[in-house]
Amino acid sequence: MTTKSYKHEMIKQVDEHGRIVIPKKWRDEHLKKSSTVKLEIKDDEIVLKSYEPVDITKYFNSLKADIKSDLDDWDAVKKELYRKHPIKRS
């Protein structure tokens, strides 16, 4: 299987606030799901990559614990959890 690789380059001016403009065509093609980017320093280069945060919502409402405390009282919930599952210190 052959993978095609392509490279596009463009010279851009960095303004006094450190900003550059990414061409609209590039944004449309490579920043489809998010307008957030990740900057990395790799050797002597600054690398800009599209970034999509990990969706953790599948973990919401999935904690199962046998507790009697009122869930609106987080201090009581925390105290009960510590009593049932004490932190082991070495």
Image: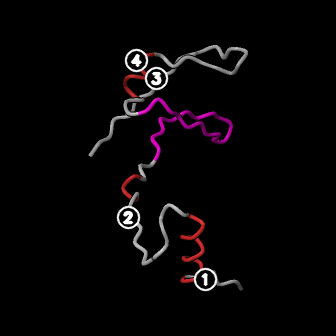
Q: CA distance from mark 1 to mark 4?
A: 55 Å
Residue at 36% over, 56% down: 58
Left or right of 27, for residue 47: right
* Residue type beneath disc 1: Pro
Q: Is residue 38 magenta-colored?
A: yes
Check the image and report above or below for 70 versus 20: below
What residue is at 57 percent from the left and 70 percent from the top? 76
Question: What segment carries the magenta color?
Answer: 34-53
> Where residue 25 is drawn, which disc sits there?
4
What amino acid type is highlighted by mark number 3? His
Marking on residue 86: 1
Marked residue nearer the N-terminal end (2 or 1): 2
As shown in the figure, which amino acid type bears the numbered disc 4? Lys
Separation of residues labelled 4 and 2 (CA atoms): 41 Å
Question: Where is mark 3, residue-wise?
Answer: 8
**Mark whose residue sits in front, 4 or 2:** 2
